[in-house]
Each structure stands twice: as C-alpha cells, then as structure tokens.
Image (cartoon, rainbow, N blue to C red):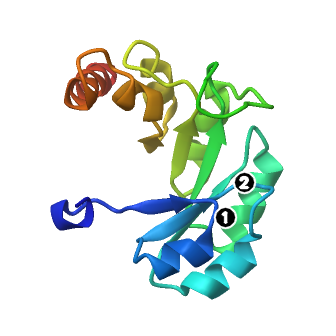
C-alpha cells in the first residue's frame, strides 16, 4: 500500500524479513544486525538506516560505512520503545551543518513538540504515536504533523 503511493516502507530491526517481504529497506538499532550484515543482505538497492542514539561517534561511523540515514533520539519521553538515551536538538543542528547523510529524529515526537527538531535540521521525523494514537485517527494525526512542520519551516 505504501509503495503504491510512492512511499518507502522500512522493516524495523530485521534485514532478512525486509528482504523476504519486499520492503524498501530496514531500520537497525545498535543491538540489531550490524550494518555490514544488513547491507550484505539487502544489497545497494535498498535503504539501511541506523539508530545512533545521541552519539556523534556512532553516527559518523554509520555514515562512513554507507548508511542511508542516521537516526538520533529519543528526543522526548515515549511509550513506543524504552528510551535509554535522551538526545538534544543541538545534535541535529551539528549533524545537518557538517554532514550530507540525512538524519531522522526519533522518540515522543508530536505536532506540539516537533518545531525545535525541524528547525534544528532533522530531515525526517519518526512519529509513530503522533499518528496512530491521535484521538481523531491517523489521518488527523498526519494533518496535524504536516501543519506543525510547515509552521516550523
């Protein structure tokens, strides 16, 4: 469904399942399949993104290895996944000023708090709860986020 609308669909954590199910790529954490293995499984034609928490070092390593994006976070409290590390928006600013590999902000992002991340240079926002937990439904959640992002630009 996502691909038919021109939207990439990524599997979380499992490069093998991403390949088997025809996903466009995989998002891996530091405790998942190592980047090199995920890339070997998926080849060069699919996306491999890497969570780097709040570590500049991990992000630079991932980018040097060829990651298609690096993800930082959690920026805010989240119920989606246990957040062991808290990242600050300044990390996104630093990354966007020095690097060409896109960044993704993760963790508790809502229409009400996304402006600082957008203004700091996040290329993408991971917004699971803001979409799926919106009291008016997922479409309303997406509309709220789009409006907040537009207002922050």
Comparing 134 with 35, the one in front is 134
* Residue 62, x across and y down, in percent: 71, 63
| SS under mark 1 | helix
* Residue 41, x across and y down, in percent: 62, 85
The residue positioned 37% from the left and 19% from the top of the image is: 111
| SS under mark 2 | helix
Disc 1 crowd rating (10 Å Cα; few below 14, some 14-19, many 20+) is some
The residue positioned 72% from the left and 31% from the top of the image is: 82
Q: Which mark is residue 27?
A: none
Residue identifier under label 1: 63
Comparing 38 with 99, the one in front is 38
Q: Quadrant of residue 1?
A: bottom left
Do tag 1 and tag 2 residues touch (Cβ < 8 Å)? Answer: yes
The residue positioned 30% from the left and 26% from the top of the image is: 145
Q: Quadrant of residue 127?
A: top left
Using the rendered image of the protein, determine whether residue 153 is visible from the camera's viewpoint.
no
Q: Real-space Cα distance between discs 1 and 2?
A: 6 Å
Q: Quadrant of residue 55?
A: top right
Q: Which mark is residue 59?
A: 2
The quarter in which the C terminus is drawn is top left
* Residue 122, x across and y down, in percent: 49, 38
Q: Is residue 105 above or below residue 78?
A: below
Q: Is residue 90 left or right of residue 18?
A: right
* Residue 125, x across and y down, in percent: 45, 38
């Amino acid at each position: 469904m996502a691909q038919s609308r021109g939207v990439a669909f990524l599997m979380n954590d499992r490069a093998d399942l991403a390949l088997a199910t025809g996903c466009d790529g995989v998002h891996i954490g530091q405790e998942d399949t190592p980047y090199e293995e995920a890339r070997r499984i998926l080849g060069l034609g699919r996306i491999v993104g890497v969570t780097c928490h709040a570590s500049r070092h991990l992000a630079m390593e991932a980018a040097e290895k060829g990651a298609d994006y690096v993800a930082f976070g959690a920026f805010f409290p989240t119920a989606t996944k246990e957040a062991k590390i808290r990242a600050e928006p300044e990390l996104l600013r630093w990354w966007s000023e020095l690097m060409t590999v896109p960044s993704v902000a993760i963790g508790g992002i809502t229409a009400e708090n996304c402006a600082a991340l957008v203004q700091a240079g996040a290329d993408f926002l991971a917004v699971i709860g803001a979409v799926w937990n919106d009291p008016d439904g997922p479409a309303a959640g997406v509309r709220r986020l789009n409006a907040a992002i537009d207002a922050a630009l």
